[in-house]
Image: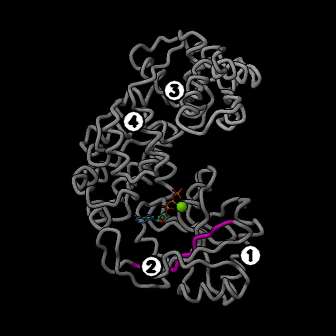
């Protein structure tokens, strides 16, 4: 790595992809100077996979809309008042922002002015390495020492940390998020002090914004040291209104590696929270989690079922049948994390077998439906439902073995009119 301002990034596949070229050609039709900005430049410098491609231009957003339309590209005015337009080319989104300076900032809202000054645009960005930009040919611009900070693993605000956080409190969570992903030098003392000081004001932020940053933090290869730092500084409680168990999160990170699983931020959150459905519900509400994520978190926090590697095969299958493969994996992972947190010497092989049960045994479906009972002559009504429940209990008791005919025979036996 060790790139310096003015150096050229090696050509990146995403820089020369046909869709990127199409967007650049459209935006450059009037001769405007264009650059890649933000996360894509930062990650390309490190040789890491990039997230989304952001492009900046000095031209105002209405002109950006017109240029995209002219080129036949889809243009969505995602944040047009703040100078942001999303272009879609070949199914890929590109965020196009007009160079701007923040005139006045209050929380998420800012009075802004468009500018043609690249340095001013860099100065309104949060962290030094997020203020990097590069030309379409890859020539790097670095106004605030971002390349050096990136190389040294230093997460630093552009300008005065206290002021930058006061302008937008989300930046204090972004500080920790980027520390988890890029920090290698220990936290910047000024940034950390400012973040701790402003943490009680996190309540002013919307749940969606907290969720987005915290889930990205939780997805870092190892989020534990940074969460520990947040807990020690009294920050974590302001972002996460529930009791936490960091040792369970540490355990699940180790388990994911052992099992070859990609980090899953919601499952990790479930491991981080103390097993308390009410706490899980509070977090889901505060972070405005989707219904699916909320239900998943609450299922992880529920006291039952307890899964253990010494469970006999039939109860294992019964639990998997009731939970479905995804909830099953969540519960095995978190139960394993709990066990590992309590005693580090564990029987990993047996836990792995338990985790992978869905690969060996797919929960079958009851091979008979209510309408099959009607065909046997039963009248629609609550008895049919009750009989289905009984049938299912019998079928489970037979270890899911009876096939359709055996189930129908069982029902026929039950409903046969008494012999005269
Ligand atoms: P990633 O997309 O990988 O999460 P990113 O750096 O692209 O990381 P985004 O949230 O997409 O992060 O923001 C794009 C850029 O916009 C950032 O790199 C930064 O320059 C700027 N930015 C985003 N949020 C803020 C903020 N709250 N304050 C100041 N600048 C910000
Ligand atoms: Mg981004």
Q: Choose between 209 and 198: the one closer to the eye.
A: 209
Q: Which mark is residue 333?
A: 3
The residue tagged with tag 1: helix, strand or loop? helix
Give the vertical position of 286 relative to 243 (above or below). Answer: below
Give the magenta range. Answer: 92-101
Which quadrant of the render holds ligand 2? bottom right
Q: Are marks 3 and 1 in contact (CB under 8 Å)?
A: no
Locate residue 406, reporting x and y percent: 74, 19
Callout 2: few (<14), some (14-19), or many (20+) C-alpha neighbours within 10 Å? many
The residue tagged with tag 4: helix, strand or loop? helix
Q: Which residue is mark 4?
A: 225
Which is more foreground, mark 2 or mark 4?
Answer: 2
Q: Is residue 274 magenta?
A: no
Callout 1: few (<14), some (14-19), or many (20+) C-alpha neighbours within 10 Å? some
Q: Choose between 372 and 83: the one closer to the eye.
A: 372
Q: Are marks 4 and 3 in contact (CB under 8 Å)?
A: no
Q: Earlier in the sequence, mark 3 or mark 1?
A: 1
Locate residue 235, reporting x and y percent: 27, 46
Give the vertical position of 142 relative to 48 (above or below). Answer: below
The residue lying at 50 percent from left, 77 percent from top is: 118
Alpha-carbon span between mark 4 and mark 3: 21 Å
Q: Which residue is mark 2?
A: 82
Alpha-carbon span between mark 3 and mark 2: 43 Å
Which is more foreground, mark 4 or mark 3?
Answer: 3
Q: Are marks 2 and 4 in contact (CB under 8 Å)?
A: no
Q: Earlier in the sequence, mark 3 or mark 2?
A: 2
The residue tagged with tag 2: helix, strand or loop? helix
Callout 4: few (<14), some (14-19), or many (20+) C-alpha neighbours within 10 Å? few
């Amino acid at each position: 790595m060790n790139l310096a301002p003015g150096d050229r990034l090696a050509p990146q596949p995403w820089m020369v992809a046909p869709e990127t070229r199409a967007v650049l050609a459209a935006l450059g039709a009037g001769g405007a100077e264009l650059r890649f900005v933000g996360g894509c430049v930062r990650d390309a410098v490190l040789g890491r996979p990039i997230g989304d491609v952001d492009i900046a231009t000095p031209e105002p957003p209405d002109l950006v809309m017109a240029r995209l339309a002219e080129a036949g590209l889809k243009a969505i005015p995602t944040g047009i008042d703040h100078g942001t337009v999303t272009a879609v080319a070949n199914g890929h989104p590109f965020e196009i922002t007009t160079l701007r300076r923040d005139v006045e900032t209050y929380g998420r809202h800012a009075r802004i002015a468009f500018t043609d000054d690249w340095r001013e645009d860099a100065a309104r960005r949060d962290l030094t390495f997020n203020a990097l930009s590069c030309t379409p040919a890859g020539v790097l611009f670095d106004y605030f020492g971002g390349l050096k900070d990136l190389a040294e693993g230093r997460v630093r605000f552009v300008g005065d940390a206290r002021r930058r956080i006061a302008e937008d409190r989300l930046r204090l969570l972004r500080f920790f998020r980027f520390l988890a992903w890029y920090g290698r030098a220990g936290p910047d003392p000024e940034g950390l002090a400012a973040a701790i000081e402003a943490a009680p004001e996190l309540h002013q932020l919307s749940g969606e914004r907290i969720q987005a940053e915290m889930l990205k933090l939780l997805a870092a290869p190892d989020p534990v040291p940074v969460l520990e730092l947040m807990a020690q500084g009294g920050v974590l409680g302001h972002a996460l209104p529930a009791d936490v168990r960091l040792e369970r999160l540490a355990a699940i990170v180790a388990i994911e590696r052992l099992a070859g699983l990609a980090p899953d931020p919601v499952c990790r959150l479930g491991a981080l929270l103390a097993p308390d459905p009410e706490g899980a519900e509070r977090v889901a509400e505060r972070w405005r989690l989707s219904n699916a994520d909320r239900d998943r978190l609450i299922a992880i926090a529920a006291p039952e079922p307890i899964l253990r590697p010494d469970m006999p095969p039939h109860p294992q299958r019964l639990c998997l049948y009731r939970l479905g493969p995804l909830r099953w994996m969540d519960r095995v992972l978190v139960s394993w994390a709990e066990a590992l947190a309590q005693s580090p010497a564990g029987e990993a092989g047996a836990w792995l077998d338990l985790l992978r049960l869905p690969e060996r045994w797919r929960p079958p479906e009851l091979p008979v439906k209510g309408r099959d009972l009607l065909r046997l002559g039963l009248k629609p009504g609550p008895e049919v439902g009750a009989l289905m429940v009984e049938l299912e209990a019998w079928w489970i008791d037979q270890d899911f073995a009876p096939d359709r005919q055996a189930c129908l025979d069982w029902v026929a036996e039950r409903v046969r009119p008494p012999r005269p």
